[in-house]
Amino acid sequence: MRDLVADAQARFDALANYQVRLKSTSAGAEPVEVLYAYRKPGFVRMDFIRPHAGATLVYSPASGKVMLWPFGFDTFPRLMLSPDSRMIRSPQGHRVDQSDMGALLVDVRELQQHGDTQVAGAETVGTRQASHVIVTCRPGRVMARVSRYELWFDASHGLPIKVVSEGASCEPIETVLLEDLHIDVPASQLRPFA
């Protein structure tokens, strides 16, 4: 059986950057919508659509710090924060420096090593054809609060376009949609990271 998670990891390892519209929903939290950009070796930029419309976060692996512009990129004021600051962590505990697709795939691969992987078949997510994969941890094992991932890998580029995470009691933790994914964007079209 083909390992779609390993294929996605290899595809991620081969890319230089990506931009995506990320939509996250979770129980008891306000929906989040972000224009997300990633550039190797780990630069992250998040332009918030909701909540905190207009706010921008940029993480630099060179400094190990996050620059926050509450009212838009390169405006005053700006704050320099640690990536583990409670002020910029998501309700699920996600850190900006560990928010990229590669970090997700590492977590999924670790769960795979302690559980089972099932290919549920081909499905449509929005307008995209995708392969649906379910990774479930063995009973009694939980990785970073997650005991099950459902992932939909785009048929054309092999990267995830939808991810659902669940806890040990099968309670939904988060659903993330990755829309308008652009891979290896030319530097002139990539939103700046500094």
Image (spheres, rainbow, N blue to C red):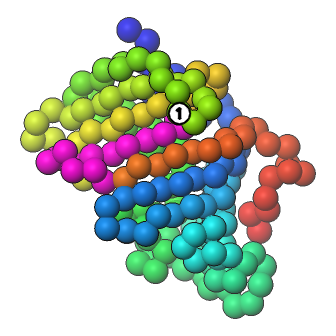
Q: Residue at x 24, y 32 (%)?
A: 136
Left or right: 30 as drawn, with respect to 11: left
Outermost residue toward the bottom in this view:
77
Magenta stretch contains residue 164:
yes
Q: Residue 146: percent from the left, percent from the top?
A: 27, 47
Q: Residue at x 75, y 75 (%)?
A: 73
- Whether residue 77 can be seen here: yes
Dividing the picture into quarters, in which one does residue 194 lie?
Answer: bottom right
Pick the residue in front: 24 or 144.
24
Q: Residue at x 15, y 41 (%)?
A: 141
Outermost residue toward the top in this view:
1
Amino acid type of the residue that numbered disc 1 sits on in the rendered structure: Val
Pick the residue in front: 24 or 14.
24
Left or right: 163 as drawn, with respect to 159: left
For disc 1, the neighbor class at 10 Å (few under 14, some 14 to 19, many from 20) is some
Q: Residue at x 77, y 84 (%)?
A: 75
- Whether residue 146 can be seen here: no
> Magenta stretch mostly in which secondary structure?
strand
Q: Residue 70: percent from the left, percent from the top?
A: 64, 83
Vertical side of 139 occupied by 190: above or below:
below
Q: Residue 162: percent from the left, percent from the top?
A: 48, 39
Magenta stretch contains residue 192:
no
Please give the residue where the numbered disc 1 appears in the rendered image: 125
Q: Which residues are magenta?
A: 160-173
Left or right: 15 as drawn, with respect to 110: right
In the rendered image, the quadrant that contains the N terminus is: top left
Q: Residue 30: percent from the left, percent from the top?
A: 43, 69
